[in-house]
Image (spheres, grey):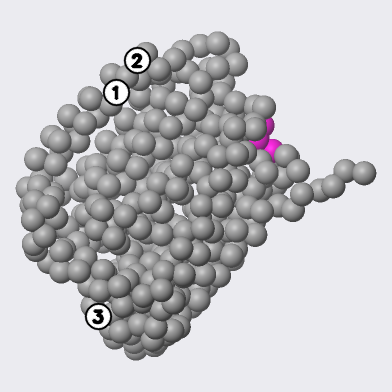
């Protein structure tokens, strides 16, 4: 009698979502009260995005990979369109008011669906999303489909990889959003690497990418200043990092207790989003942070195992690309919290506040769960 193994990807997905909701309730109250006059405004918004993300998760969970071709193409074309709009808007100075692509913190990274003077959505207000989050999944799906086709026809895929990945990364860089552009480039490179294509030409990509990255750093003086401040331990960003480290250090081994964080009172930057890991560390200590990292670690282990065990090229590259995407964001977020790298604004998948990130991450995990389903 065949024993059916339990599907672990859906369980891990909703367990991480639950962790996010629990700590959103603790971390977002002060900010929500100050900005919206309601202590649980951000929490309710985040909970409201879970059914949307779940719809995407279960849709991609059930879809056959053979039918992913058209969806991948449509997602990629839409994503390129969104990024082109932001790239053009990003060339305009922030003094210019572009309602559907506003300048927030010096960059145009959001598209608003109902900007003023259009009516606001009750409770939500202005609805917007980040096309770069949309494109992370779009890049993985489209590049995976194209490379798998080329491999079956025994054709070279290097230039396809370079064109697709380079175009997407370049458009995101123009917003400007260098950290996400680097993530997209690395995701595309991992998909190409895992596909089994020749790596001879790929060896030239790394030095060229490093040179282009340095050019973009020096093209925007604030990026160079941020890097210098990070090395020297100076500037407003270092103040925020010190507050994060104080938060993590205050938690000790077992934490100060749920809801008892003091650093969340206007000390931590983006407390419900980028810095939620610090709140977890303060309230549940080293035990809490290691437990969360272990959950992510097991999810990554399952994802890469699925990629290694795949019999089909498309399954292999999809599983590797999605798993690497999530793992890279976890690493960047946590590394920034402990001052290994500068703060980047990259959220902790499924845990940090953010509808765009949650919905598209759940869609990707739905694909991964579907691959797992076919293995059990």
Question: Would you say 329 lies left or right of 35 here?
Answer: right
Circles 1 and 2: CB atoms closer than 8 Å: yes
The residue drawn where x is 51% and y is 52% is 297
Percent coordinates x, y for residue 209 in the rendering: 24, 29
The residue drawn where x is 25% and y is 74% is 246
In front of the other: 300 or 145: 300
Question: Would you say 287 lies left or right of 114 here?
Answer: right
Residue reaching furthest to the front = 253
The residue drawn where x is 51% and y is 20% is 196
Q: Which residues are magenta?
A: 64-68
Looking at the rendered structure, which numbered label has been put on residue 266? 3
User: Which numbered disc, 3 or 1, marks the residue that appears first in the sequence?
Assistant: 1
Q: Which of the 4 quarters of the picture holds residue 106?
A: bottom left
Percent coordinates x, y for residue 116 in the rendering: 30, 68
Please tell me whether residue 105 is drawn above or below residue 187 in the rendered image.
Answer: below
Looking at the rendered structure, which numbered label has been put on residue 201? 2
Chief secondary structure of the magenta span? Answer: helix
What is the distance, in whole Å, between disc 2 and disc 3 at their CAs?
49 Å
Q: Residues within 10 Å of mark 2 (few under 14, many from 20)?
A: few
Percent coordinates x, y for residue 37 in the rendering: 34, 88
Residue under label 1, please give it.
205
Q: Which of the 4 quarters of the picture holds residue 211?
A: top left
Label 1 element class: helix
Please tell me whether residue 227 is drawn above or below residue 210 in the rendered image.
Answer: below
């Amino acid at each position: 009698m065949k024993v059916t193994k339990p599907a672990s990807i859906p369980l891990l997905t909703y367990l991480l979502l639950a962790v996010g909701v629990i700590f959103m309730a603790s971390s977002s109250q002060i900010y929500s009260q100050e900005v919206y006059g309601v202590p649980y405004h951000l929490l309710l918004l985040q909970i409201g995005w879970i059914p949307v993300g779940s719809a995407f998760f279960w849709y991609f969970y059930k879809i056959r990979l053979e039918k992913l071709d058209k969806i991948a193409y449509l997602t990629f074309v839409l994503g390129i369109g969104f990024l082109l709009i932001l790239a053009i808007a990003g060339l305009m100075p922030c003094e210019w008011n572009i309602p559907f692509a506003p300048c927030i913190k010096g960059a145009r990274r959001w598209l608003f669906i109902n900007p003023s003077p259009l009516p606001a959505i009750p409770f939500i207000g202005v609805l917007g999303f980040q096309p770069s989050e949309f494109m992370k999944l779009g890049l993985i799906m489209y590049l995976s489909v194209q490379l798998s086709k080329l491999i079956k026809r025994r054709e070279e895929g290097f230039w396809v990889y370079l064109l697709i990945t380079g175009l997407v990364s370049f458009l995101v860089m123009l917003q400007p959003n260098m950290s996400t552009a680097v993530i997209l480039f690395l995701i595309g490179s991992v998909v190409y690497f895992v596909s089994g294509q020749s790596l001879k030409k790929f060896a030239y990509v790394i030095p060229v990418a490093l040179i282009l990255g340095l050019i973009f750093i020096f093209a925007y003086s604030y990026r160079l200043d941020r890097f210098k401040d990070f090395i020297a331990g100076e500037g407003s960003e270092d103040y925020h990092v010190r507050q994060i480290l104080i938060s993590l250090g205050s938690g000790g081994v077992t934490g100060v207790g749920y809801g008892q964080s003091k650093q969340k009172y206007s000390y931590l930057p983006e407390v419900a989003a980028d810095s939620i890991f610090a709140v977890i560390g303060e309230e549940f200590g080293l035990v809490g942070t290691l437990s969360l990292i272990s959950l992510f670690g097991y999810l990554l282990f399952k994802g890469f195992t699925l990629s290694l065990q795949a019999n089909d090229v498309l399954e292999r590259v999809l599983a590797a690309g999605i798993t690497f995407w999530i793992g890279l964001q976890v690493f960047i977020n946590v590394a920034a919290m402990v001052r290994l790298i500068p703060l980047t604004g990259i959220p902790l998948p499924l845990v940090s506040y953010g509808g765009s990130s949650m919905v598209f991450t759940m869609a990707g995990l739905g694909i991964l769960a579907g691959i797992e389903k076919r293995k059990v």
